[in-house]
Image: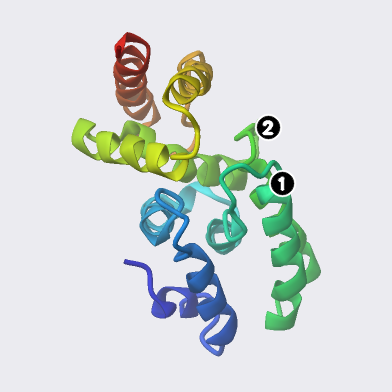
Amino acid sequence: MVSLADWQRLFPGDASIGADLIARWSEPHRRYHTLDHLGFMLQVIDDHGDAADDVDAVRMAAWFHDAVYEPFAADNEERSAALALDVLPGLGVPPDRVAEVARLVRLTAGHTVAGGDRNGALLADADLAILAAPPADYARYAASVRAEYAAVPEEAFRSGRAQILGSFLAEPSLFRAVPARAEWTARAHDNLRAEITTLLGAP
């Protein structure tokens, strides 16, 4: 579980902003976009930090990327980027790094990564890493997503979710930074196909 100590690896002198972020990630309406998701991302970033040009900027972006989160909002990433732009200067982060963190946060809206964007590639890989998890972990993730969108009627959820997963499945290379990206993509495709089959085949 992510704690204030993890935030203080980046900002040893800060407690208030770190505590605020942890409170945001702990909001009761969250089921998947929780501290567990953040911790999973931070572990991927730590494990593959040499794939980034500025790994601390990637870590900061992970902390902020869903700091503002409402399941049906279209501007979560933009509002999360705005939060980063607001608070990071007060922690002494230089303007160019603040701008990079905000750019990375916005990138998670669609996970579109330009060639040569090593920071963006690592953040996107970390955010999507759950897709390549073992089947049991993936099943828990899928159930958490359904719980987060409990207000959506079953038929509409199945159709919409299958469409989203199909867009991921159409990507020949889901991952770009981790050394095992081909294996991760293959596992993710297996998980995606299995969930789509369940969604479309269920009565």
Q: Residue at x 50, y 72 (%)?
A: 23
Name the disc covering residue 75, or none: 1
Residue 86 spot, x, y in % from top left:
76, 71
- Classed neighbour count for the residue bearing mark 2: other residues with Cα under 10 Å, few (<14), some (14–19), many (≥20): few
Amino acid type at circle 1 is Asp
* In the image, residue 21 above or below residue 177: below
Amino acid type at circle 2 is Ala
Closest to the camera, between mark 2 and mark 1, is 1
For the C terminus, the image quarter is: top left
Specify the quadrant of the image occupied by residue 117: top right
Residue at mark 2: 114
Callout 2 secondary element: loop
Q: What is the spatial separation of the Cα atoms under label 2 and label 1, in whole angstroms?
A: 22 Å
Q: Viewer-proximal residue, 151 or 106?
A: 151
Left or right placement of residue 95 versus residue 203 in this view: right
Q: Viewer-proximal residue, 171 or 54?
A: 171
For the N terminus, the image quarter is: bottom left
Residue 105 spot, x, y in % from top left:
65, 51
- Classed neighbour count for the residue bearing mark 1: other residues with Cα under 10 Å, few (<14), some (14–19), many (≥20): some
- Is residue 129 visible in the rendered image? The answer is no
Looking at this rendering, what residue extends furthest in the bottom direction? 13
Mark closer to the chain start, 2 or 1: 1
Left or right placement of residue 180 versus residue 175 in this view: left
Q: Residue at x 68, y 32 (%)?
A: 114
Residue 27 spot, x, y in % from top left:
48, 64
